Image (cartoon, grey):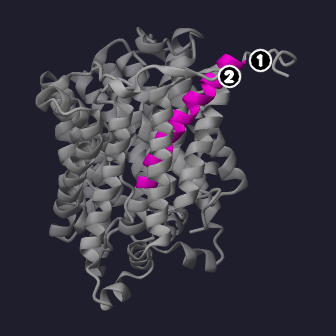
């Protein structure tokens, strides 16, 4: 299959590490200063979705696999974390871990099935399996149906940090987000990540070089699902709610949109994309259904005109990697 | 035999009939998806929205101009098919050289726009559409009651499906289409206008979806979200059948509808997930799909 991200020239490669380091420092500074100006609850929500989009980008951007069912991992992890914190009374760190484990387990099952087909079929299979688990969530008792699981306790992290304070919660979210972000950067720039990119560029060739590409794809899929699970679990603790919205197909579409807007296969793109889309939803909430129409129009516009996404176009224009 | 197994034939055949009706829609929609994918290499995510547009076109034709069901059955697919032609010329034609994924993303965006617009104007509640006078009532077959309209839907969709199969597999036009699917450059060298053929193919696939929408209007309520969940099931049907064969799409569509109906009778709680479960099983046993070639 052909590449989704653009190849970079040699000069840009030499500057790569430096431009990414600079951009990372800017991101870090922005995250530290932001709560002085912006409502922390909004920032935390956007960070959860940024993490979700980064996890999704690991698949589409670096392996070239379009999963149209990532809400499955995000939503179910958020249900399990909420249930663990509220009903089982687990502390937040264990509740979030339970969400991650949910993402990993579901990722294993869906991954084994979906990687048996390529390209367009992969997208349809992930979408269909996610829809199935959405219907299970609708019928299951513990998910609370239309009400969802509300009033999830935030609790005390490791028994010490009181997460009911928004600022404490905010810096915990920032720490988790940055940890996962650096982990994804590490994965993408490891020998394992190089093989993933080789599969994206030319799978038959990677096979002919002796790589068992199915195993690489499966591991990448599980990693992506686990991190999406981390995002979902964190979201359940932060916003104190898990609902059907998180597990339904429009959510799968939203994470695709966030990544597309920021830039497929860029490190920072999904973060910018998530903040843009969440901000848009916040400010346009009063327009009701027009939000859906605008999201659709953004999809069409970016596919036709800015396939590299905002960060991708910027990097291309400045001839650097981001 | 029914007494022995403690099965109520009335309820069983009733569910089978519903299954056949659903199967008619699966078959018509997956047929359209397969035809479009064959020529354009695009998975048309807006197919569900275009099915919904067909139902709304029938509804609006009746409300605004007084044109009845039979007129709508012809006119609605033409109108919606024409919007398809416009969409192909405006958007899709720029994507053929790109990765298939972009076609999916663009048509997903279009589906969001269409659904959002209809929800703005008509709200989320369903609007009723009357069964045409000629087809009200039904026949008692002894073992079950068969409403006339439902019988008509099954017969009409079977007819349209087989007509499509005949045109594509048995006529000169179909031969051009199949040849252009295999090797567009060579077919153009013979002086056939392939780009126009692609445009019309998309229009035809969309018109099929709209036709299904008109037939669905009297059975289900006409509502903006009627297509979005259906299209996900149809995707599963397409994965099960594989998009390589027209007959495969028809057989899989009807077959899965029947299986769904049977499940509704024997294990009602599994009825909306059974098609996805079958998809998972088919992927394990025959990854290329029942009628597909490995690709």
Establish if B137 lies above or below B119.
Answer: above
Quarter-of-image position of residue A247: top left
| Label drawn at residue A111 | none
In the rendered image, which quarter contains the N terminus of chain B? top right
Q: Position of residue B214 (x, y in %)?
A: 32, 37
Report whether A206 appears left or right of B53: right
Quarter-of-image position of residue B187: bottom left
Quarter-of-image position of residue A305: bottom left
Residue B14 belongs to the span the image colors magenta:
yes
Q: Residues within 10 Å of mark 1 (few under 14, many from 20)?
A: few
Q: Position of residue A21 (x, y in %)?
A: 29, 57
Q: Position of residue B56 (x, y in %)?
A: 24, 33
In the rendered image, which quarter contains the C terminus of chain B? bottom right
Q: Are marks 2 and 1 in contact (CB under 8 Å)?
A: yes
Q: Position of residue B75 (x, y in %)?
A: 22, 45
Prevailing secondary structure of the magenta residues: helix
As measured in the structure, the alpha-carbon distance from the residue carrying label 2 to the one carrying label 1 is 7 Å
Report whether A251 appears left or right of A199: left
Please give the chain letter of the residue carrying mark 1: B
* Mark 2, residue position: B12
Q: Nearer the viewer, residue A198 or A164?
A: A198
């Amino acid at each position: 299959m052909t590449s989704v991200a653009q190849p970079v020239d040699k000069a840009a490669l030499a500057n790569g590490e430096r431009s990414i380091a600079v951009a990372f420092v800017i991101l870090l500074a922005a995250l530290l200063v932001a709560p002085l100006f912006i409502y922390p609850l909004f920032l935390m929500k956007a960070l959860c979705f940024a993490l979700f989009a980064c996890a999704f980008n690991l698949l589409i951007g670096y392996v070239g696999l379009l999963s149209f069912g990532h809400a499955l991992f995000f939503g179910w992890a958020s249900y399990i974390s909420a249930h663990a914190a509220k009903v089982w009374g687990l502390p937040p760190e264990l509740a979030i871990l339970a969400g991650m484990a949910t993402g990993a387990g579901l990722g294993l099952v869906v991954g084994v099935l979906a990687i048996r087909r390529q390209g367009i079929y992969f997208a349809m299979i992930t979408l269909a399996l996610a829809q199935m688990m959405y219907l299970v969530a609708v019928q299951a008792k513990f998910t609370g149906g239309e009400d969802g699981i509300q009033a999830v306790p935030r609790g005390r992290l490791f028994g010490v940090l009181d997460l009911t304070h928004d600022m404490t919660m905010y810096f915990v979210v920032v720490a988790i987000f940055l940890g996962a972000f650096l982990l994804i950067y590490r994965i993408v720039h490891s020998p394992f990540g190089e093989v993933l990119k080789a599969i994206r560029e030319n799978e038959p060739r990677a096979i002919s070089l002796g790589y068992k590409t199915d195993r690489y794809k499966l591991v990448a899929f599980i990693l992506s699902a686990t991190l999406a699970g981390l995002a979902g679990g964190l979201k359940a603790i932060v916003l104190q709610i898990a609902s059907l919205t998180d597990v339904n197909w429009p959510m799968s579409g939203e994470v695709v949109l966030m990544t597309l807007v920021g830039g497929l296969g860029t490190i920072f793109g999904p973060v910018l994309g998530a903040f843009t889309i969440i901000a848009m939803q916040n400010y346009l909430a009063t327009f009701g259904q027009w939000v859906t129409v605008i999201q659709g129009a953004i999809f069409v516009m970016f596919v036709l005109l800015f396939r590299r996404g905002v960060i991708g176009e910027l990097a291309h224009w400045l001839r650097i990697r981001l | 035999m029914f007494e022995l197994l403690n099965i109520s034939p009335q309820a069983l055949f009733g569910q089978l009939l519903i299954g056949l009706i659903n199967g008619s829609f699966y078959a018509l929609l997956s047929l359209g998806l397969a035809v479009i994918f064959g020529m354009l290499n695009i998975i048309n995510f807006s197919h569900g929205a275009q099915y919904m547009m067909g139902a709304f076109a029938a509804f609006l034709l009746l409300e605004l101009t007084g044109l009845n069901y039979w007129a709508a059955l012809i006119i609605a697919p033409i109108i919606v098919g024409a919007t398809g032609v416009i969409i192909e010329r405006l958007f899709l034609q720029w994507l053929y050289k790109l990765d298939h994924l972009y076609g999916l993303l663009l048509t997903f965006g279009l589906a969001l726009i269409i659904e959002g617009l209809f929800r703005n104007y008509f709200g989320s509640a369903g609007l009723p559409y009357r069964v045409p006078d000629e087809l009200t009532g039904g026949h008692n077959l002894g073992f079950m009651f068969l409403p006339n309209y439902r019988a008509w839907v099954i017969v009409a969709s079977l007819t349209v499906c087989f007509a499509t199969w005949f045109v594509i597999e048995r006529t000169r036009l179909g031969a051009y289409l199949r040849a252009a699917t295999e090797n567009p450059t060579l077919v153009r060298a013979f002086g056939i206008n392939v780009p126009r053929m692609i445009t019309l193919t998309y229009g035809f696939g969309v018109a099929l979806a709209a036709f299904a929408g008109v037939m669905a209007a009297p059975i289900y309520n006409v509502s903006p979200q009627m297509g979005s969940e259906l299209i996900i099931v149809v995707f599963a049907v397409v994965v099960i059948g594989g998009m390589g064969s027209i007959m495969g799409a028809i057989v899989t569509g009807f077959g899965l509808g029947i299986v769904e109906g049977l499940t509704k009778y024997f294990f009602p709680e599994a009825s909306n997930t059974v098609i996805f479960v079958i998809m998972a099983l088919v992927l394990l046993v025959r990854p290329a799909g029942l009628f597909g070639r490995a690709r």
